[in-house]
Image (cartoon, rainbow, N blue to C red):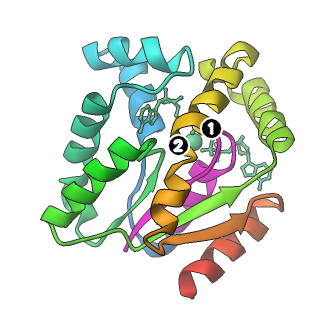
């Protein structure tokens, strides 16, 4: 099963993708987590990516495609994977379609987590206080939301045209949202 989680920053993509990965014994692949590791490790890629991540901008597509191509080629993706944070725009979605087409494993489902803007900002602020993630700073959240609205949100139509989207209301508790994710996937 190849699943993509879509939704605004702070919607709960990482939280739900991690739970689903454990439930299905599939790897949870978060491009945000992969980038933050490169940044923490101080690699050349991390130093380059941080210019974008720290200002709330999308990292260029060619860099992201290299990262995702390398990750999806690993053995643990043989039975599928749960993607969180990729694709982020139409061009990345097309690149992913092409990549998955080559190995004959098209996307099974796109789970879109719907959360009101006020709630995502609240969740991000709470996480900032707990974890201190750099790009959760008030000055960066606005730019992340702008990137999401301009570039990522159009993916909803892209995948709806292919009949792949299941919408999940992200407002309840983590457990309630997860129940809904499982319900949608069983349909
Ligand atoms: P990324 O790491 O993907 O960040 P994001 O999309 O902004 O999403 P978040 O990780 O902030 O939120 P989430 O939806 O995962 O929510 P979470 O589960 O944590 O990307 C970061 C940056 O990397 C980008 O800005 C860009 O620069 C770069 N990047 C990454 N991928 C890229 C790509 N493909 N192309 C180009 N650039 C890319 O939940 C949020 C908080 O809420 C947590 O504290 C959680 O505990 C809490 N929470 C979750 N669910 C609930 C609930 N139901 N009720 C209450 N609290 C909840
Ligand atoms: Mg995340």
Tag 2–tag 1 contact (CB < 8 Å): yes
Quadrant assignment, res 104: bottom left
Image quadrant of ligand 1 equals top right
Indicate yes or no whether the magenta region holds residue 13. yes
Residues 90 and 121: in front is: 90
Residues 58 and 76: in front is: 58
Q: Residue at x 55, y 53 (%)?
A: 6
Q: Residue at x 57, y 35 (%)?
A: 150
Q: Is residue 144 above or below residue 97?
A: above
Q: Is residue 7 visible?
A: yes
Q: Residue at x 35, y 11 (%)?
A: 47
Q: Residue at x 71, y 13 (%)?
A: 139
Image position of 119 (left or right of 17): right
- Structural distance between the alpha carbons of marks 2 and 1: 6 Å
Residues 27 and 50: in front is: 50
Query: Where residue 65 sits: x, y (%)?
Result: 26, 39
Image position of 119 (left or right of 13): right
Quadrant assignment, res 75: bottom left
Residue 183 bears which disc, if any?
none
- Residue at the limit of the structure toward the left, as seen here: 102
Q: Which residues are magenta?
A: 1-20
Query: Where residue 20 sits: x, y (%)?
Result: 53, 67
Q: Is residue 9 above or below residue 38?
A: below
Q: Is residue 162 above or below residue 71?
A: below
Residue 149 bears which disc, if any?
1
Residue occupied by mark 2: 152
Query: Where residue 95 sits: x, y (%)?
Result: 26, 48
Query: Where residue 26 sits: x, y (%)?
Result: 39, 66
Q: Is mark 2 within 8 Å of ligand 1?
A: yes
Number of other residues with Cα within 10 Å of mark 2, as a class: few under 14, some 14 to 19, many 20 or more: many
Q: Is mark 1 within 8 Å of ligand 1?
A: no
Q: Secondary structure at mark 1?
A: helix
């Amino acid at each position: 099963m190849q699943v993509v989680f879509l939704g605004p920053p702070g919607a709960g993509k990482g939280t739900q993708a991690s739970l689903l990965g454990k439930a299905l014994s599939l790897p949870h692949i978060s491009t945000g987590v992969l980038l933050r590791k490169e940044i923490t490790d101080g690699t050349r890629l991390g130093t380059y990516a941080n210019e974008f991540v720290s200002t709330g901008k999308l990292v260029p597509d060619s860099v992201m495609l290299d990262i995702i191509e390398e990750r999806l080629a690993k053995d643990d993706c043989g039975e599928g994977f749960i993607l969180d944070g990729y694709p982020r725009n139409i061009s990345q979605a097309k690149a992913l379609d092409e990549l998955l087409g080559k190995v004959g494993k098209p996307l099974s489902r796109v789970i879109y987590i719907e959360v009101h803007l006020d709630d995502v900002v609240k969740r991000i602020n709470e996480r900032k206080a707990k974890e201190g993630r750099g790009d959760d700073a008030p000055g960066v959240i606005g730019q992340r939301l702008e990137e999401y609205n301009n570039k990522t949100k159009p993916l909803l139509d892209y995948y709806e045209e292919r009949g792949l989207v299941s919408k999940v209301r992200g407002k309840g508790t983590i457990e309630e949202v997860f129940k809904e994710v499982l319900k949608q996937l069983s349909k």
